[in-house]
Image: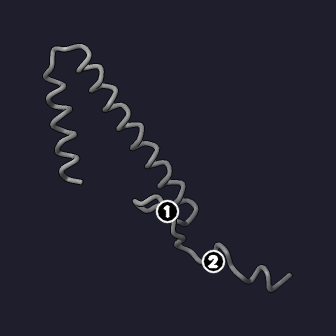
Amino acid sequence: MKSFIDDYNDVVKEAGESNTKDVLRNASWMTGMTDKTAQKAAGISNAANRASATYTNNGTYSKKDSSLTSSKIDKEV
């Protein structure tokens, strides 16, 4: 991951030093999409936390509180 981040930051830095309109436009689009992706990931994580679940980095959820699906409901019917 560190390598990807370093490469990404290098691209942003180099693009920022460019005088070519297309390079600047593409770099702006790339950083904007990265920001939107980060916002969506944060939203998913926040929603999972409100539901007493954890959103993992591989795209799965794990419940923190087993009382969410208590078997007691079926026993009292």
Residue 63 drawn above or below residue 41: below
Residue 58 drawn above or below residue 75: above
4 on left or right of 46: left
Q: Quadrant of the C terminus?
A: bottom right
Q: Determine the residue positioned at 24% across, 20% down.
A: 24
Report which quarter residue 30 is drawn in.
top left
Gap in Å between the C-alphas at discs 2 and 1? Answer: 19 Å
Q: Mark 2 is on which residue type? A: Ser
Q: Determine the residue positioned at 83% across, 84% down.
A: 76
Q: Nearer the viewer, residue 73 or 10?
A: 10
Structure colour scheme:
one colour
Q: Quadrant of the N terminus?
A: bottom left
> Which comes sooner in the sequence, label 2 or label 1?
1
Which residue carries the number 1 mark?
60
Q: Where is residue 39 drawn, in percent x and y? A: 43, 42
Which residue carries the number 2 mark?
67
- Foreground mark, 2 or 1, reads 1
- Please identify the residue farthest to the bottom as the structure is shown: 75
Label 1 neighbour load within 10 Å: few <14, some 14-19, many 20+: few
Instruction: Say whether marks 2 and 1 touch (CB < 8 Å).
Output: no
Q: Tag 2, which secondary structure?
A: helix
Q: Determine the residue positioned at 54% across, 70% down.
A: 63
- Please identify the residue farthest to the right as the structure is shown: 77
Q: Determine the residue positioned at 29% across, 19% down.
A: 25
Q: Nearer the viewer, residue 66 or 29?
A: 29
Q: Where is residue 10 drawn, in percent x and y? A: 15, 37
Q: Where is residue 70 drawn, in percent x and y? A: 68, 79
Residue 49 drawn above or below residue 5: below
Q: Mark 1 is on which residue type? A: Thr
Label 2 neighbour load within 10 Å: few <14, some 14-19, many 20+: few
